[in-house]
Image (cartoon, rainbow, N blue to C red):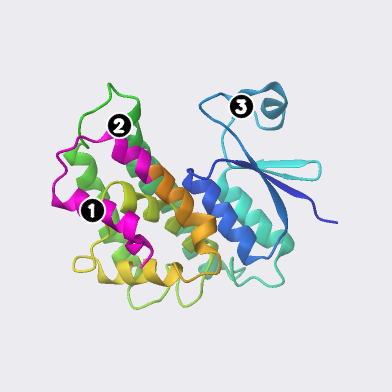
Amino acid sequence: MVHLVLYGTETSPPVRAVLLTLRALELEHEFRRLDMQAGEHLEPELLRKNPQHTVPMLEDGEACIWDSHAIIGYLVNKYAQDDALYPKEPLQRAVVDQRLHFETGVLFHGCFKPLQRALFKENDAPEVPKDRIADLHEAYAHLERFLGENPYLAGGQLTIADFSVVATVSTLHLSYCPVEGAKYPKLSAWLARLSTLPHYDEDNLRGARLLAERVRAKLPKQFDKLWQKAFEDIKSGAGKQ
């Protein structure tokens, strides 16, 4: 019998990418929430299982796997009935892998992490750095081009690349810079398409909203119209269009 245990926190985009993959594969699992602020991820038993002390971490029997991209690829390779979510054909897989690397290097570490540091760690910045928002718009523009005429990021079918990227982009959309349909019509339509996935609200949107409210509490009251619209979307549910 499969016994999967996922460690993490809902506010983490990589954790939510794994939750979306588990849902797509219809895999039963236990989600053990960790209080990162309290240092639960640094407890000796967890450090033994994951010396890098990051989330998400997946426990599959005696095996422990961390890094969301490693986890979601592993889950499809081991448990999927076919390779639709992570194609085995070399070129198709290369495209999926490129999108995953883009999520890691550009979206998560290049955009999301610096914004989080600026607001929560680096002298409690009173506003979001404009250069970081410029980087984010550049990333959105790349995604717009990646989509082209396709419904999904790696082509005509849903893949784990979509799960990984939507977890981060939906967070950036709600917390820092909305994906405007006028500027990014294909990316906006893709967000709307992904939001129709079964249990999307539970697996992804809820955690994205939790983080967005924390960001909102840190930003000054003098939001410009852009920020006001973004947080109105949170309350109205428009962020999942």
Which labelled disc corresponds to residue 40?
Answer: 3
Question: Observer-nearest residue: 186 or 5?
Answer: 5
Picture quadrant where residue 128 is located: top left
* Rendered location of residue 60, percent (x, y): 76, 47
Does the residue at mark 1 contact the one at mark 3 (Cβ under 8 Å)?
no
Which residue is found at the position 53% from the left and 51% from the top? 16
Q: Most extreme residue toward the right, as rendered?
A: 1
Q: Is residue 91 above or below residue 168?
A: below
Reading the chain from its start, which is encountered first: label 1 or label 2?
Answer: 2
**How would you rate the neighbour count of disc 2 (Cα within 10 Å): few for under 14, some for 14-19, many for 20 or more?**
some
Q: Amino acid at mark 3?
A: Glu
Q: Is residue 134 above or below residue 217?
A: below
**How would you rate the neighbour count of disc 1 (Cα within 10 Å): few for under 14, some for 14-19, many for 20 or more?**
some
Residue 164 visible: no
Question: Observer-nearest residue: 55 or 63?
Answer: 55
* Rendered location of residue 221, percent (x, y): 18, 37
* Rendered location of residue 11, percent (x, y): 47, 43
Which residue is found at the position 46% from the left and 78% from the top? 156
Q: Amino acid at mark 2?
A: Leu
Q: Which residue is mark 2?
A: 119
Q: Which residue is mark 1?
A: 137
Residue 84 within the segment the image draws in magenta: no
- The magenta segment is 212-241
Between the C-alphas of marks 1 and 3, the distance is: 35 Å
